[in-house]
Amino acid sequence: MLYVIVGDDRPDSLAERLAARPAHVERLKALLNEGRLLLAGPFPSIDSADPGPAGFSGSLIVAEFASLEAAQAWADADPYVAAQVYEKVTVKPFKKVLPA
């Protein structure tokens, strides 16, 4: 089943985000290589694809996991959690309707 993971960034966490990004992206690439990643990306803090020093307000990941518990465990082990980039992480089941 698909699950959505939303991480809300802690204010002023851009430096920590940038430092933890390589490890975060490697985990996403592993999901992608397994055919389990639907989409992933950050929320720019301003209306710009490259927010520069304004940074990001969080991230969205939609991926397939065996259960809600497995999705939560994966999210809890994210390098952004360890680096205290995220101040809150929400994991919910997700039903993709469109595009089919």
Image: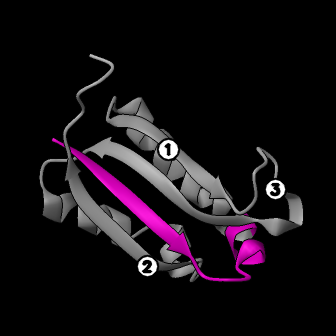
Pointer 1 residue: 40
Q: Residues within 10 Å of mark 1 (few under 14, many from 20)?
A: some
Image quadrant holding the N terminus, namely: top left
Pointer 2 residue: 88
Q: CA distance from mark 3 to mark 2?
A: 21 Å
Q: Residues within 10 Å of mark 3 (few under 14, many from 20)?
A: few
Image quadrant holding the C terminus, namely: top left
Q: Nearer the viewer, residue 23 or 52?
A: 52
SS assignment at label 2: strand
- Which residue type carries mark 3? Pro
The quarter of the picture where residue 51 lies is: bottom right
Q: Nearer the viewer, residue 28 or 49?
A: 49
Which numbered disc, 3 or 1, marks the residue closer to the eye?
3
Range covered by the magenta-colored residues: 1-18
Q: Is residue 16 a member of the stretch shown in magenta? A: yes
Question: With 36 as the anchor, is 13 left or right in this view?
Answer: right
- Which residue type carries mark 2? Lys
Point 56% across, 83% down: residue: 84
Q: Is residue 7 a member of the stretch shown in magenta? A: yes
Between discs 3 and 2, the one toward the N terminus: 3
Please say if 51 is above or below 88.
above
Between discs 1 and 2, the one toward the N terminus: 1
Q: CA distance from mark 1 to mark 2?
A: 17 Å
Number of numbered callouts drawn: 3
Image coordinates for residue 81, horizontal then vertical, percent: 49, 76
Numbered label attached to residue 51: 3
